[in-house]
Image (cartoon, rainbow, N blue to C red):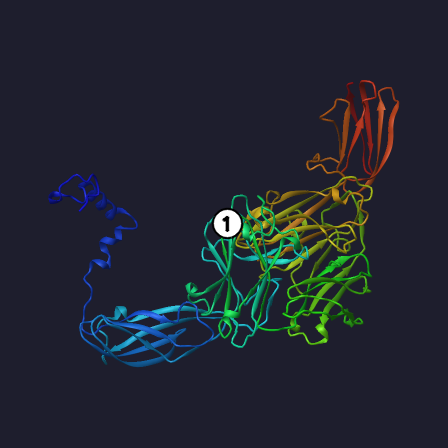
Amino acid sequence: MFQNYMDYTNDACMNLITQGQVSRMDVVLANSPRRKSLTTSPGLLDPIVVVNDLGIRSIVTPGSQLCPGMSTPNLEVRNYGTGMVTSTQIRLFKNDVEVETKNFTLSLNQLESTTVSFTPVSNAAGSTSEYKFEILQTNGTTDDNSLNNKDSINTTTPQQTSLPIAELFNTIPATWEIQNPDGLQTWTLRTAPGNSPTNQAMFVNFYDYEEIGALDRLVTPVFDLSSATTPVIKFDRAYARYPGGELDELSILVSLDCGADLSLATEVFKKSGTALSTAPTTAVSFTPSGASQWVTETIPLTGFIGQPNVQIIFVAKNDYGNNLYLDNVLVLSDETTDLTITSVLEPSPLFCNPSPTPIIEVQNLGSTIITSFKTITTINGTSQPPQLFTGQNLIPGETIQVTLNTTQLTNGENNIMFAVSEPNLGTDDNPANDFILMKQIVNASTDKIPLREDFDSDFSDSWIFVSQNIEEIWKPESTNKGTSPSYPAFTNSNIGQQSWLVSPVLDFSTAQEGGLFFDLSYGKRSPGSERLTIMASTDCGITYSDVLYDLTGDQFATASSTQSWIPADDSQWRREYINVNLLAGEPQARLAFVVTNDYGNNLYIDNIEIYNDDNPFPAEIESSYMVYSSSTSSNQFKITFNLPQRQTVRIQLYSMSGQIMLDSDFIDTLNQTYTLDLSEQNSGLYIVRVFTENEVGSTKIFSAR
């Protein structure tokens, strides 16, 4: 024996617990919220022991996960009584509807158990069910102890699909399952540039995920490999390691029991840290910059040939590192021919040129090399002559860009269908993904900088809202600022949909610098978090190759709200600034404000203003103009304007003797700041006279050399 404190005592008089420890335990038992119930626990009572007592020990099947089709409910029962149990009657319910009442012949002595089976029950794919079991009789009479006669379990039957699976994650697939045990960060959809800057992919935000070791699963529907010959899974992944982080992990499990017991699943892929990385280590939240930061994996599934209920489970394990992306999941059973259009790279949804040359991206989602195919473009219901592309060598999983014939569009809205057909001069095994429908708008409205747009007057011909198909769209809404473009995410459950707000063609040709300001309001409703991306075009909208701004609602929210968000006062807005020097000198620039829906809350923007300088902190004035001294020199002065629209202003500078030192017109003045340099003039008083369309004013200034 050993004492628990200073083991100096002879065994004959040893005290295992001190009096103080006894007192402490008494206090804890009497007062601890988690322990004081022990004094009245049923565990204090002697167990009920009766003669006739058959009880449910466990539900063997079904478990919490159940495969589609027929399954046999199995129940383990035990004799808890003192007498032998020779028979029982048990009733089975499914979703509160009686399925079967069955009599069983048994031979159980006290504390012996056995498993009884019921008639197989059908389970529909994509359903949830509650199974209830109830012992009605023991030995032909009422059971003497009803406390252990009932048990139930809730089951989920996953969706079922046929092969091939070709999931590009343009939206979150309805037939897949996201398992988020901790209810925190998990798999969701996000813009992740690949071959296209607007590519969508699934991702897990490890960067903001503090629950180290948390697992989040993305699960395919159940599929059948009973007659497969050469099954394989392919997918693209992207990940950048956070400095010092090594344990962010992606693993892939193959389940043969519909996820009922993951300990029996087979791990076919596992990478973490450096081995998982596809991009350089970074301390900022990772978003892939393009195709070069993605890697394609190919994993054979030949070990599972003959299995009827196969599921692939992508498991993300968090180490509070950096973001993980998954895209283009392809599961094939045997030799298949499947060519798809993944995106339209050019032109964008809105542009100037009515005769664009489209560029599409096609991908081989099959298992055979594709050497030839056709494309067909349909414009406003009229099909154009097909194009034949030969001499290709498109291996499985590979993506190429294809330049099509020039199209002739009408001004305004056009409905376009791009399609591929006849891969290898044969039939495509998956024609459902052979085409893309797209709305394209030809609009050549122009404006120039500086610019101010408050959306309170009619702007419909210059600032254009665009969404594809029947997806939600930006729309003007009344706010405390007047009329503001709003995206209605609160009622849109279609995660991943996008809507564009596109500027007129902006002339930056005379600018050497540029700064963009806009107001933004967003009341975040968890777990949704809309994304706002601002892109720039220098070719009148054909392409948007420069991303100027890319943030989620977690980063730009001005409030939190569980109600449909409408800003009510200025404190619920924030002012955003973007340096747009890259547009300086460009005569055909355009800006696109693109929102990506996450079923969160409504997003508003307003008061878009573009300056012809890149000062992030321009002078704020209430009057139409202000003359003030420079903070860096006693003989330099600035004149800042705040006019309602662009106009020509006249600035004169007089000495006190009446000599005109300056008399100049400044065209297209709106929000500019002009500098008066008097360093070459004598010290003394001067008069600055300003002429605007509606005002003439004079200001005295003093210059000291």
Element type at mark 1: loop
Q: Residue furthest left?
A: 12
The residue nearer to you, when weighing 652 against 285, is 285
Residue 272 falls left or right of residue 644? left
Q: Residue 422: tell me if it is visible.
A: no
Please count the marks in the image: 1
Q: Is residue 349 above or below residue 166?
A: above
The residue nearer to you, when weighing 496 against 478, is 496
The residue nearer to you, when weighing 625 against 335, is 335
Q: Which image quadrant is residue 397 in?
A: bottom right
Measured from the top left, where is residue 482 in percent x and y?
68, 48
Measured from the top left, where is residue 136 in percent x and y?
28, 77
Circle 1 residue: 209
Residue 110 falls left or right of residue 605? left
Residue 550 falls left or right of residue 175? right
Measured from the top left, where is residue 338 in percent x and y?
65, 71
Q: Amino acid at mark 1?
A: Tyr
Q: Residue 121: tell me if it is visible.
A: yes
The residue nearer to you, when weighing 447 against 293, is 293
Quadrant of the image for the C terminus?
top right
Q: Is residue 445 above or below residue 141?
A: above
